[in-house]
Image (tube, grey):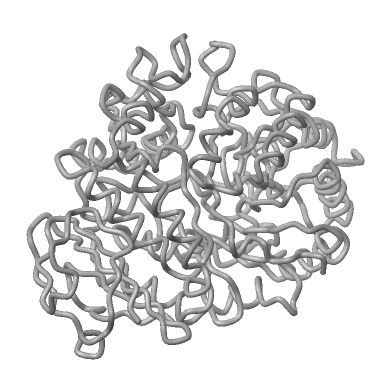
Amino acid sequence: MKNTKWYENAIIYQIYPRSFMDSNNDGLGDIPGIISKLDYLKELGVNCVWLSPVYDSPQQDNGYDIKNYVDIYPPFGNLDDFKLMLDEMHKRGIRLIMDLVVNHTSDEHKWFIEAKKSKDNPYRDYYIWKKGKGKKNKRPNNWLGFFGAPAWEYDKTTDEYYLHLFDKKQPDLNWENPKIIEEVKSLMKFWLDMGVDGFRCDVINLISKDQRFKSSLQIPAGAKYYVNGPRLHEFLHEINKDVLSNYDCMTVGETAFTTLEDARLLTAPERQELNTIFNFDHTSSDNFMGIKWLYRKFSLPRMKKSFKKWQVGNIWGWNTLFIENHDQRRCVGRFNTNDKELRVESSKMLGTMCYFQKGTPYIYQGQEIGMTNAYFKDLNQYQDTEVFTIHKLLTKLHLPKKFIDFTIPNGARDNARTPMQWDDSEYAGFSKSKPWLSVNENKSYINVEEAKKDPNSILNYYKKLIQVHKEQKEIINKGDYVDLCINHKKIYAYTRTYNNETLLCISNFSNKETKYKLPKHLLNKEKELLLNNYEVSNINEETLILKPYETRLYKLK
């Protein structure tokens, strides 16, 4: 394999193009807008960008419904704009990974338009079709999609149902058809030959379905038959062998409901499938099974146990570290933190806690300035198709209005998709026209320009955090992880040790002062304070009195 594992030293910044920067004032972010902010990314210290989809798309699911895999959505720009962006990134030492969305297409993709015409159409087997059951022509099974609706949609023209694990306008591809894997190889080569540095593989562990298509009472319904399906590893190995192994590129798979054993099968180097995966165990610290709509009270021990599981248990692969992305609500205000009076302290603490574990850090746009959830009050303010499907489901279940009014604002993906806040102007410097999604009202004091002026801002803290991460990368990459108080309900303290040097990270997940006594084996070591979000008068104290959401990173020798 040509892969040099450069991703192990990457700091990756996720750009959600609709909301990053609008260059032509049409209210929608675009590629020229991204180009205009590349110096900002370089100054921040990132050396890789994960770009959410910019392919041609009807935008039913904001680009995750692709109409043409080898062209750009016109409002974002064109292929020449993309090539210029890629070139300008590479000039600045920034690599680019794109979203690879190959579990499904848009229903406006030419393949599906053809597939719908007749059962004997050459493209029919590009998708998954089944006859209805019984005299009433019921759906083929009870599978539910990830947006909470039935996973089968009836097509009157051919009197059959097609499978869609997401929106009905996102039909699933049939990977049992060898032509699909050849199509996927072709489109991957197109972008890699252009110079792209890899792919974030969207819902990649769903591409293989159990061909029995049986119903299931397990929640979510049907998942046992379409998550990590029977031919998943065969498909991924073939793509790796025929495409990825020929390029110095990386892959990171989005893999919901994945165990450590699944991770081994997906990422063990000798198996030649994926380089890394996203696991979502830690997001279950405030919900059930990683399903954000199934809210439960945050538990710090639960979060720590999930991190330890992957830090200690993933001995064959490489981890990914994230606390925000385009599908998760903002981290500050989540995980028992404060997005009001103690927003700055909370944001710094969460970043420090997460990014000094073993793995590649992923920073989501706006996280570095402490952007917060929008908590829209009016359903009409939302744009995400998932919100409307979930709202319809919750209403249909006759759940109390109070429950629905809490669940939607707290779980909505639009919370993380509001326009990037560059300054305090009417539309936060994102655009001079009304944006596609409302700007957060707190733009007046949460924005990049204000953050640049304040030496104690979250932005300047993230710059220092990234610099410290680069300086300590040997310990971070190779050090052993030890959780020092896994059952403590307020303190998260862990060490990373390599070659007689130790990083000690201590974080207070409480809005109150909390005492923490250092373990005896750490007391007599020479201490250097690398990061802190409050002033520290004595770095050698045995019992720390940590202020609300205080965090400290020490180097011990």
Picture coordinates of residue 447 (x, y %)? 34, 28
**Relative side of 532 to 120, left or right:** left
Task: Tell me the residue at 42%/47% (across/down).
Answer: 463
Between 260 and 405, the one nearer to me in the picture: 260
**Relative side of 462 to 326, left or right:** left
Picture coordinates of residue 368 (x, y %)? 39, 42
Task: Tell me the residue at 57%/38% (across/down).
Answer: 167
Q: Quadrant of residue 88?
A: top right
Decide: is 157 above or below 130.
Answer: above
Between 277 and 134, the one nearer to me in the picture: 277
Q: Can see residue 187?
A: yes
Q: Quadrant of residue 440?
A: top left
Q: Can see residue 148?
A: no
Task: Tell me the residue at 86%/60% (across/down).
Answer: 246
Decide: is 551 above or below 504.
Answer: above
Picture coordinates of residue 59 (x, y %)? 60, 27
Task: Tell me the residue at 60%/37% (across/down).
Answer: 168
Quarter of the picture containing the C terminus is bottom left
Q: Report how many numbered discs are placed on residues in the image.
A: 0
Decide: is 106 above or below 245.
Answer: above
Between 115 and 147, the one nearer to me in the picture: 147
Quarter of the picture containing the N terminus is bottom right
Decide: is 289 above or below 82.
Answer: below
Picture coordinates of residue 17 (x, y %)? 57, 31
**Relative side of 301 to 512, left or right:** right
**Relative side of 281 to 109, left or right:** left
